[in-house]
Image (spheres, rainbow, N blue to C red):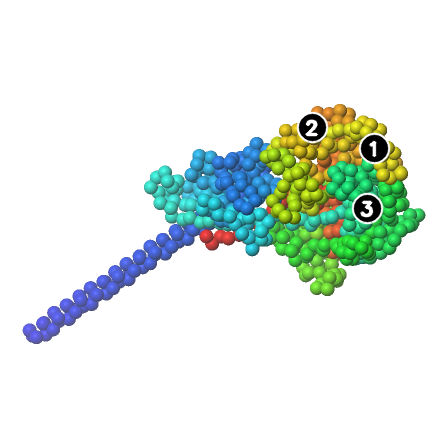
Amino acid sequence: MKRQRNAKQNESGSSLLVSLMVIAGLSLLGLGFVAISETESAISVNERNYTQTLQVAEAGARTVAEWFNAPEFTLATGLMPANDNDLKQTRTNASYTGVYKPDTAMELLCDIPFSQDSDRFYGVDAASADIVITRANADGAAFLDQFNSRILTDAAQGGRIVEIRIYGPPVVGGTFTTTGGLKFWNRNVGVRYGLATIAVTAEKTRDGLLTGTDNSPVIARRTVRIVVAELPLPGAEGPLQSHSGTGTTGNFRVHWGKAISNNDMAVKRLHTSLPWIDSWERIPFQEGYMTYDTTRPKYLYELINKGFEDPWFEVRARAASTPPPGSPATSGTNQLWLYTSMNDVENAVGTSGYSGHFQFQNEDNRPLNKRNVLFSRPVYEIWKQIAMAGAGQQGIYYLRYVSGSGYTSLWRDTRGITKQYNEWVNVAAGGGEGFFFFDTTDGSNPQLPNGATNTTVLTPTVDLPSSAGNPFKMRGFFYMNMQAWGSSGLQTPPGYYGMPGEPFQDIGVHVADTVTGQLKCTIVANPTPVPCATNPGSTPKLENFTNREWNFQDLNNNGVFDYKMGTNAAVVTPSGSDSPAFPVGDLWLPIPYSDACGIAGVGTSCSEPHEPYLNLIYPADYAFGAGSTPNPVVAKWEDPTSQTRRPKKQNAAGVRVTCTSASPVADCTSNTYDKIGPLVILGGSAGDGPVVEGIIYNEGNYDASGNATYFGAVLVQGTVGGTGTPTVFFDESLSRGDWANKFKNLPRTIMTTIETDQ
């Protein structure tokens, strides 16, 4: 009996031990699960902090990118700081020393222009940023507080922007200058892949408080970098450009620029323009203005007091160019009308006045009177990627073809919104303004490797009759992949539009020494510039030649061209027999700069060194006179006390400024060089207005079936044909690069790279 009881007692102890072991195991397992859950919770919190901070940094970077597109708007809404040199670092490279956009009173940060010395971003990296906005100074801290309050609802919980830096874009093959540990790209060395790099840093702290003011540690910090580039608007060279040929049976008219064809060309209306010596050289009016070649006659005097229908008009074809009926060519093969001597009447109809008309321009060969002309085809893949990358951004529309033809054809954007063609583009009826990309039927590239077009994927023809809606107006850049595009019967309210600026000779500025005021020359034996006066036979030192811009040397650093007008002290007899003599005191011209005048005399005794320009007296109100004939533009300078001045600006109500003798040159034309011409109505009556303002490009054909007016450029990969009477006036702002001032909803820049892994 005792042995049995002892056995039972031993079994009870084993059960207790097993129970304790099970309990201990379960406890350890529970503790493990608790530890795992705490780790997962910590990971979740860290992931949330990481994601929130990254999103804050990206939102800030995208907002800063908008500084380049809408500087006035972002400044007014507090999203961009005022121009403050305390927010900048001084840049020093091989050609420039100074801060970015130094004129704080007149310039906005990130505003156009983008490419001049002081307007470029040169910093190589974030440490060398041109613009640095941090909490290190009061101005930066105040703006960051304002910036965060504008874009974030709860900076304490979600994080805040603590740093904004803007510096140069990536430069392939570039070199840089290092100064004080900062590195800045050298200008014009290497290839700049963009306009600027934006680096925005966001932080989140444990208690949501600012770092540096308390002991709240940073729990997340992220930097987002964005590279922005200028929107590469096609560089139109003139009002009409065609790849496959231009031939109309109607009365197609082009004005104020160059008509180009990669094939045959037939322009039905020609206009007298500045004469051309050959396909390479327009009449060299620098001779007489500033004489560099004493063996040449003074051509300038042959132009004074002559009126031209269209001083800027040219026709250039790679194949044959057919003259209009009744105006047969009377000269050689490649230049249809010649300006043979100074005895020719420079503005004569049908002869020297038409000397800017060329054919067979398929190579560069001056002895054969050939200068290669080529229509640059906008690349489908590039523009499609730009449209798709920016789709949804204000002013960018990527549209897929849905169905139908004509103006009622249906198109769908990336948001799924479907509208008719006319509803998308007619700003007079609520349509958009900006960059439109109308894709092919199946989204495939119609541009074949051999340069031809796969017309089978082009969408049906779009014609715009009066039933498409009147008034009707399109504004922006329209890239279309249609069998044909055309308009007829459309009307738009009248308005004022800018004529081209004055012609100039892009031969460079003969510069003066900024200390001594002496004109500089070069000699073979010494590469260092020497005074011209003491070195007979030396060569004038020229700067900024062939850069396609009119230039002057700002000797007194006041930011404007200072000039002085004077008259002839003796009778001037032009070399050509067609031009009468100028009596004493009758010929007004700018007085050129000289050593005797010096820097102190510019504006009072002489003009600053500058490239020769031809002053024009523009028409008062209308581009056309009776019978749709252009009102003449007269070449001459005038008495400064009674010069003709035409308005360049208008107010929001469309009323032009009133020009007086005291009006600034930015508002009205004058004896000085006018980069922008005056505002006129495009036609001969107050009812005329353009139905398109901007650039039309079609991969297919253009059908000239109506009498619409366009202001901008028409680019056609196919043929230009039809029986209509359309008129195209070239908008010179498209070639000057200041189109962004006109199309406020057209983005100035696009984001090419976004890095979110920093």
Report the label total: 3
Identity, as a three-letter code, of the amino acid under mark 1: Val
Which residue is label 2 attached to? 605
The CA span between labels 2 and 3 is 34 Å
The CA span between labels 1 and 3 is 24 Å
Identity, as a three-letter code, of the amino acid under mark 3: Trp
316 or 570: which is nearer to us?
Answer: 570
Please give the name of the residue rendered at 43% of the width and 51% of the height, measured from the top-left corner: 50
Which residue is label 1 attached to? 572
> Crowding at label 1, few (<14), some or many (≥20) Cα neighbours within 10 Å?
some
The percent position of residue 714, horizontal first and vertical second, equals 76, 49
Please give the name of the residue rendered at 74% of the width and 44% of the height, measured from the top-left corner: 712
The percent position of residue 467, horizontal first and vertical second, equals 79, 45
Res. 74 visible in picture? no
Please give the name of the residue rendered at 59% of the width and 42% of the height, measured from the top-left corner: 117
Identity, as a three-letter code, of the amino acid under mark 2: Ser
Q: Is residue 518 above or below residue 406?
A: above
Going from N to C along the chain, the mark reached first, 1 or 2, is 1
* Picture quarter with the N terminus: bottom left
Task: Tell us which disc is closer to us: 2 or 3.
Answer: 2
> Crowding at label 3, few (<14), some or many (≥20) Cα neighbours within 10 Å?
many
**Quadrant of residue 138 in the image?**
top left
372 or 459: which is nearer to us?
Answer: 372
Which residue is label 3 attached to? 276
Please give the name of the residue rendered at 84% of the width and 54% of the height, measured from the top-left corner: 334
